[in-house]
Image (tube, rainbow, N blue to C red):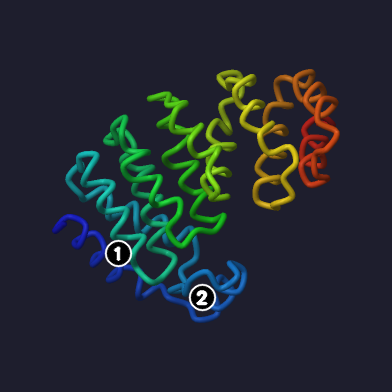
Amino acid sequence: MRYAEFVVNELRRTLAPLANTDVAKGARAYMKDVAPFIGVRAPERRATAKALFKTLDRPDSHTLGETAHVLYAQKEREFAYCANDMIAFFIKCADQDFLEQHVQELLITKSWWDTVDGLGSSAICPLTLAFPNKRLINTWNSSDNMWLVRAAIQHQRGRRSETDVEYVLKICARHSNSREFFITKAVGWALRDIAAFNKPAVRRYLHEHPELNRVTTREAERGLNR
């Protein structure tokens, strides 16, 4: 825990001088008041965090997860962003159990699209490629928690030709009747990504699922029209 406390204290010390009240108010309003903000712009936050991470000893998987939890527990939203940055920086330290032991809980901690999608990029996409775990993804996809569902739908974003198209479309199909914005948007993004390299698969999916929400089809069509 001393490792985690050191990281939190150093980030709090180095981010404080960068605080901007107007930025904090704007960010809090944009994020629907999910949490207060220090008011540090993203490029400055990333640079400050990266400078700290470069000085740290490499954590083991448990320490990395523990530190992320402590960061997420902080009141200000920037600490959750720093946790995602830290996971990305030390991703090779994360083991095959990291998603289930740590990320799953982070996904449902003060959840909003910013932290959930951040975990997708920093942890879920790379770790499900390194350690495929359909059991866990299926569990998330059948959950009543929409953020776990969103994470499952998006777990292969950005893989292009490495995407398991049949599996991703199966995940999406479970939610073809959904009208929850954050789920329908995620399905649309998944289809848009697949359309970049496999348009026939997306056209077939749209034909087989006429019940899809317009939010989903609009995103898919953007991919098809590129």
Residue type, mark 2 in image: Ala
Q: Quadrant of residue 13?
A: bottom left
| Number of marks in picture | 2
The residue wearing badge 1 is 11
Out of 183 and 87, give the one closest to the viewer: 183
Helix, strand or loop status at disc 2: helix
Out of 25 and 179, give the one closest to the viewer: 179
Residue type, mark 1 in image: Leu
The crowding category of the residue bearing disc 2, from other C-alpha atoms within 10 Å (few below 14, some 14 to 19, many at least 20), is many
Residue occupying the point 44% across, 66% down: 77
Residue occupying the point 55% across, 78% down: 25
Q: Is residue 221 above or below residue 47?
A: above
Q: Is residue 26 above or below residue 78?
A: below
Quadrant where the image shows the C terminus? top right
Q: Is residue 102 above or below residue 36?
A: above
The residue wearing badge 2 is 24
Q: Earlier in the sequence, mark 1 or mark 2?
A: 1
Position in image of residue 114 (x %, y %): 54, 56
Q: Is residue 83 left or right of residue 112?
A: left
Position in image of residue 84 (x %, y %): 40, 50
Residue occupying the point 53% across, 43% down: 143
Position in image of residue 166 (x %, y %): 64, 19
Q: Is residue 161 left or right of residue 179?
A: left
Residue furthest bottom in the image: 21
Quadrant where the image shows the N terminus? bottom left
Out of 83 and 16, give the one closest to the viewer: 83
Q: Are marks 1 and 2 in contact (CB under 8 Å)?
A: no
